[in-house]
Image (spheres, grey):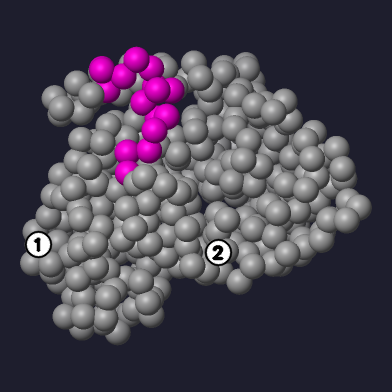
Amino acid sequence: MTDPTEAGGSADGRLPVVVVGAGAMGGEWIRMLARSPYAMAVGVVDLDVELAAATVASAGLDGVVIGSSVAEVAERADAAAVINVTVPQAHRVVNEQALRAGLPVLCEKPLAPTVAEALRQVALADITGELLMVSQSRRYFNHLAAFRRAVAALGPLSTVNAQFFHADHEPGFREQMAHPLLVDMSIHHFDQLRSLTRDEPIAVRCSSWNPPWSWFAGDAAASAEFELASGARFVYAGSRCTPGSQTSWNADWRVWGEQGSASWDGDDVVRVEADGVGIDLPDGREGIEGSLEEFVTALRAGATPQNEVRANVLSLAMVEGAIRSSERGGERVVLADLLEASLADAIADERSDDVAALLASWTSAAEGIATPAWGSAPATIASGGAR
Ligand SMILES: NC(=O)c1ccc[n+]([C@@H]2O[C@H](COP(=O)([O-])OP(=O)(O)OC[C@H]3O[C@@H](n4cnc5c(N)ncnc54)[C@H](O)[C@@H]3O)[C@@H](O)[C@H]2O)c1
């Protein structure tokens, strides 16, 4: 297991990391790392080595080790961690290479295309003893934190509503996916719902479709209703191929509770209609900078970040539950049942004996994701924007 006190080898105290995946988002990470006080890119890996070199050069960096093998680049660069910014279907394989090489991982969302693949990674993180954290970067917005504080003051909730309407053209893996909205985008909003309400999803009914003019191969639009453990409902509607009346990338939110209501436009407008409830805006790092700060802080403190791999499984279950419901004509899908079916799939799919044996030893998937694999206490981050 990585010794948290040793995780951070550069002279200025920044964590030396390898970025795997040098595409559009990998470039964002590499440019952010170039100015980060928390970590620095010492290696960059991509199947396309020329792309990796070009992305490093465009960030104005020298001396970065470039290659196509995670373990080899990490060793040559003397890296202490990996940031996985590959396409979703490569996340598990790359995370496995890194964790087996003794390197903790901060992995871009979605952790995996299915809950079964996510459960295999929970077991893998357990076996290696390394931190695997999912970068759900849309949890880290100061206005979301202010909105969360306002929502907490509304008392028991009745209804949470979120809408996401965009027309985004990002050629590549998204345009080929069966469910580009739910798998690649709604994962953010479903995860934000859990962060916002501290409530957990129980069941979902969903319908997804592809508007006739869509430039996506799969379903670019969906509407879904989730039942939450408190009894409240989360009502979601979204599309990635709807020009006009664009919402924020963070979606547009409204919440109604016993004491009143609150709304967030997903950017910088939070409103509250409830007696005695104000708006308290923190000043933390946002987006991937906030996510990186929490990863490095948790690693050094041996603490559990909010998006430690196990905590992320229910966000993915919301996505897969919505897809299964849509495929069954809007049938109600119970997420606890989905988790247990996914555990059986995970055991059947797994090729590593140690991971398969650990999965098979769980009495249930619910038990398997109950206790964080890493850290003894919740991580606290200096800037406080995330919580
Ligand atoms: N947090 C956010 O707001 C946000 C925004 C955009 C993208 N993302 C996520 O970032 C990830 C990457 O998205 P993108 O737009 O950069 O995709 P992209 O297709 O532009 O880049 C992905 C890169 O990964 C490389 N790659 C694929 N498999 C690999 C492997 N096995 N080993 C090494 N390299 C491999 C590809 O060659 C490619 O260069 C996705 O998971 C996406 O959902 C997050």
Answer few, some or many: residues within 10 Å of disc 1's Cα (few below 14, many 20 plus, some between 14 and 19).
some
Indicate the quadrant where residue 277 lies.
bottom right
64, above or below 301, in the image: below
- What residue is rendered at 32% in x and 53% in y? 302
Q: Which mark is residue 387?
A: none
- What residue is rendered at 62% in x and 16% in y? 331
Residue span colored magenta: 359-374
Question: How many numbered dots are placed on residues in this image?
Answer: 2
- Res. 365 in view: yes
- The amino acid type found where label 2 is placed reads Gly
The x, y position of residue 127, in whole percent, is 20, 35
Element at label 1: helix
In this image, 55 relative to 281: left or right?
A: left
Name the residue that disc number 1 marks. 75
- Res. 218 in view: no
The x, y position of residue 251, in whole percent, is 66, 52
The x, y position of residue 41, in whole percent, is 26, 71
Indicate the quadrant where residue 114 lies.
top left
Name the residue that disc number 2 marks. 384
Mark 2 or mark 1, which has the lower sequence index?
1
